[in-house]
Amino acid sequence: MTNDTPARGADRPALIVGLLLLALAGVVYYDASQQTITSNYGLGPTAMPMVACVGLVILGLSHLVVAFRGGLPKPDEADRGALLWIVGGLAGLIGCIALGGGFVIAITILFASTARGFGRRALAVDAAIGFVLGLVIFLVFAKLLTLLLPLGPLERLFL
């Protein structure tokens, strides 16, 4: 991808990203405005989508400003190996939850593979750290917040 900015006009990638962000903000706003559930306490279920909408508008307008002021910097070459580790971890998380492996094992896979994608070589240590973090998060949600995350055989031992 080249970033040759013409003497006149806008930087095309920045312009496209800005317009897509503004379009996404419009979709989020429309979706939030169609909710029929209200709250008696002031903040309802539309509060967070509206905050996200404002953030998307700010990002979209910022990209449009950058598009007309010199454009985006030329991106560095992507590290394909790191990207594969991270995407593989995400696919592992989705597969583990879909196949009934549960939240803790899924987070263990995601944490270890993401750490490997960022260059860390201690896969077993990272898996142990991910396991402990996943277990703590699961227990906080299950015991303190009384919200259940995806259950697997391991999670059923703690319920």
Image (cartoon, rainbow, N blue to C red):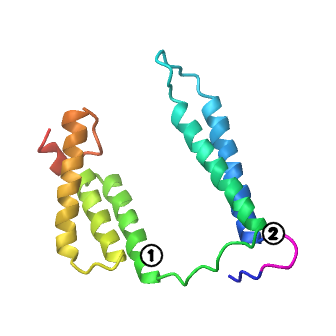
Residue 85: x and y in percent read 38, 75
Mark 2 belongs to which amino acid?
A: Ala
Q: In the rendered view, would you say 12 is above or below 136?
A: below
Question: Residue farthest to the left?
Answer: 157
Name, please, the residue furthest toward the right: 8
Determine the main secondary structure of the stretch shown in magenta: loop
Residue 20 visible in image: no
Q: From mark 2 to mark 1, how far is it between C-alphas?
A: 30 Å
User: Dot 2, how many residues are within 10 Å of its Cα: few (below 14), some (14-19), or many (20+)?
Assistant: some
**Residue 147 showing in the rendered view:** yes
Q: Quadrant of residue 142?
A: top left
Q: Quadrant of residue 10?
A: bottom right
Which sits earlier in the primary sequence, circle 2 or circle 1? 2
Which residue is outermost to the front?
69
Q: In the figure, is residue 63 to the left or right of 152?
A: right
Quadrant showing the C terminus: top left
Q: Which residues are magenta?
A: 5-10
Q: Is residue 105 magenta?
A: no
Q: Residue at x 62, y 43 (%)?
A: 54
In percent of width and height, residue 157 lies at: 11, 45
Which label lies toward us, 2 or 1?
2
Tell me if residue 79 comes above or below residue 37 in the rendering. below
Residue marked by disc 2: 10
Residue for point 60% across, 33% down: 32
Q: Say which mark, if any, is on residue 83.
A: 1
Camera-side residue: 113 or 96?
113
Q: Amino acid at mark 1?
A: Leu
Q: What is the x, y in percent for residue 21?
A: 67, 54
84 left or right of 128? right
85 relative to 39, above or below: below
20 lies left or right of 156: right
